[in-house]
Image (spheres, rainbow, N blue to C red):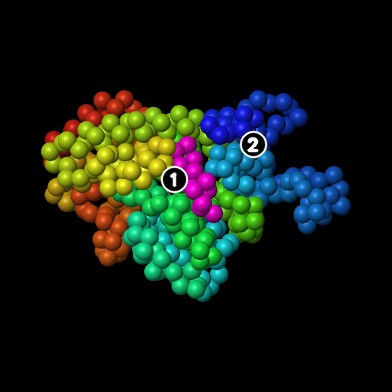
């Protein structure tokens, strides 16, 4: 370990970073449910509003509980600053609004969370920001897609739901050679298993809704990066209003305390289920970066310290068979969320990726027989037994 002994390590930061203790001396982080703050004088109010004096003003952009969450997440991702948002999609929207203007271009991957695809391809486009879609792992395609207007590369690695990867360090180098920013949606690995900023990325984006909470309770998001970049995104949150609720920030603070331990347990269960599924009749393919059969397993071992809790697999017989599998399960929850202690099962082609055009679906390789399981923390034998019910229904 090259780490200086006085620098707190990940598990310590997860529990301690960003702890703002009030005059009451509370040990657990305080929940500041207040929309505004009282000033001692008109002079103080004016100074807080114009930023010449630090301090809380209004909870759309200054709340101590939200700030605790931002500081803790920034510490875990190894970023200077973080800004919290009302959802993961709000984090992506605030990034687009804060860093791009009409005429700019985004290049992203064909393998992308379906809603992110719609945000870029419909709503950003309506405001004059266009997006090019390339195969995630193909660095030559990324390079070929660059134009003088390209300002942002946006990726998810591992991707949802197929677990495709791109070499973050290589893509960051390509981006920076052309003055382009690289943003990484780190939803699937979390900072417990992958640190994109250390690999050269400029921004990390989160849906806190997923593993940062870990128990399916609250919606939230965040962007982490340098102080200068985050300041531009803070401006959007302050002005346009997609702010994180203090209550949700408090839930996420508690979630972060157990993040690494939960991620390790999710990964252990997902690895066991993926290996078991590989040997079942009726299963045509299993997609999980922890499998030796995964075409980018070596890259996963290099840039991740774990493989996450999400896997997908294909059954023979298309949508009809996939739905029969899903409907035969009794333990797994049929829901599109992931990152919950409860295992969830979904058919991406008709849910998370249902709004994609047939061409975009084909490019993202979302087949009709594809099923995604976000493996939870139940006993692995019970999860396998439930999948056996699904397989029997094929
Ligand atoms: C869920 C998800 C999002 C969107 O987050 P919300 O909190 O639901 O708005 C973005 N990216 C990925 C990879 C996701 O799984």
Is label 2 within 8 A of ligand 1 (CB to nearest ligand atom)? Answer: no
How crowded pointer 2 is (Cα within 10 Å; few <14, some 14-19, many 20+) is rated as many
Does the magenta portion include 179? no
Quadrant of the drawing holding the C terminus: top left
Would you say the magenta stretch is mainly helix, strand or loop?
A: loop
Across and down, in percent, residue 6 comes to: 65, 30
Expressed as whole percent of the image width and height from the top left, the position of residue 314 reads 21, 46
The numbered disc on residue 187 is 1
The span picked out in magenta is 191-202
Q: Residue 303, can we see it?
A: yes
Mark found first going from the N terminus, 1 or 2: 2
Tell me if 5 is positioned left or right of 359 in this view: right
Residue depicted at 44% across the width and 69% down the height: 146
Residue drawn where x is 40% and y is 51% of the image:
167
Q: Position of residue 63 (x, y in %)?
A: 67, 44
- Residue 219 in sight from this viewpoint: no
Tally of marks? 2
Q: Is residue 212 above or below residue 360?
A: above
Q: Residue at x 48, y 61 (%)?
A: 175
Q: Is residue 30 left or right of residue 314?
A: right
Is 199 part of what is drawn in magenta? yes
Label 1: which secondary element = loop
Tell me the quarter of the picture where residue 266 sits.
top left
Q: Is mark 1 within 8 Å of ligand 1?
A: yes
Q: Give x and y (percent) for residue 204.
A: 51, 50
Residue beneath the point at 65% across and 56% down: 228
Residue 158 or residue 124, whichever sits in front: 158
Q: Which residue is mark 2?
A: 18
């Amino acid at each position: 370990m090259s780490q200086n002994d006085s620098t707190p390590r990940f598990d310590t930061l997860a529990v301690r970073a960003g702890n703002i203790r009030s005059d009451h001396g509370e040990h657990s982080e305080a929940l500041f449910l207040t929309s505004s703050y009282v000033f001692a004088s008109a002079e103080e109010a004016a100074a807080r509003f114009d930023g010449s004096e630090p301090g809380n003003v209004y909870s759309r952009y200054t709340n101590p509980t939200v700030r605790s969450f931002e500081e803790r997440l920034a510490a875990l991702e190894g970023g200077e600053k973080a800004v919290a948002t009302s959802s993961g999609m709000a984090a992506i929207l605030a990034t687009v609004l804060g860093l791009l203007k009409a005429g700019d271009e985004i290049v992203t991957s064909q393998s992308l969370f379906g809603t992110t695809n719609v945000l870029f391809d419909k709503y950003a486009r309506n405001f004059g920001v266009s997006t090019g879609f390339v195969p995630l792992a193909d660095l030559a395609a990324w390079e070929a897609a660059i134009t003088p207007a390209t300002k942002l590369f946006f990726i998810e690695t591992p991707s949802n739901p197929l677990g495709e990867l791109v070499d973050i360090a290589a893509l960051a180098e390509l981006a920076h050679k052309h003055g382009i920013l690289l943003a990484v949606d780190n939803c699937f690995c979390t900072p417990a298993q992958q640190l994109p900023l250390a690999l050269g990325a400029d921004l990390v984006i989160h849906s806190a809704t997923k593993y940062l909470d870990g128990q399916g309770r609250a919606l939230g998001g965040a962007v982490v990066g340098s102080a200068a970049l985050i300041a531009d995104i803070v401006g959007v949150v302050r002005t346009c209003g997609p702010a994180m609720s203090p209550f949700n920030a408090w839930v996420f603070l508690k979630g972060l305390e157990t993040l690494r331990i939960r991620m390790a347990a999710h990964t252990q269960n997902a690895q066991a289920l993926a290996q078991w599924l590989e040997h079942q009749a009726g299963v045509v393919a299993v997609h999980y970066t922890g499998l030796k059969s995964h075409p980018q397993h070596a890259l996963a071992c290099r840039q991740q310290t774990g493989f996450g809790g999400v896997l997908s697999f294909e059954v023979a017989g298309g949508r009809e068979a996939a739905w029969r599998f899903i409907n035969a399960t009794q333990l797994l929850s049929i829901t599109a969320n992931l990152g919950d202690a409860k295992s969830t099962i979904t058919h991406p082609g008709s849910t998370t990726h249902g709004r994609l055009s047939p061409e975009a679906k084909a490019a993202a390789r979302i087949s009709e027989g594809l099923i995604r399981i976000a493996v939870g923390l139940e006993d692995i034998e019970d999860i396998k037994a439930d999948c056996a019910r699904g397989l029997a229904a094929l």
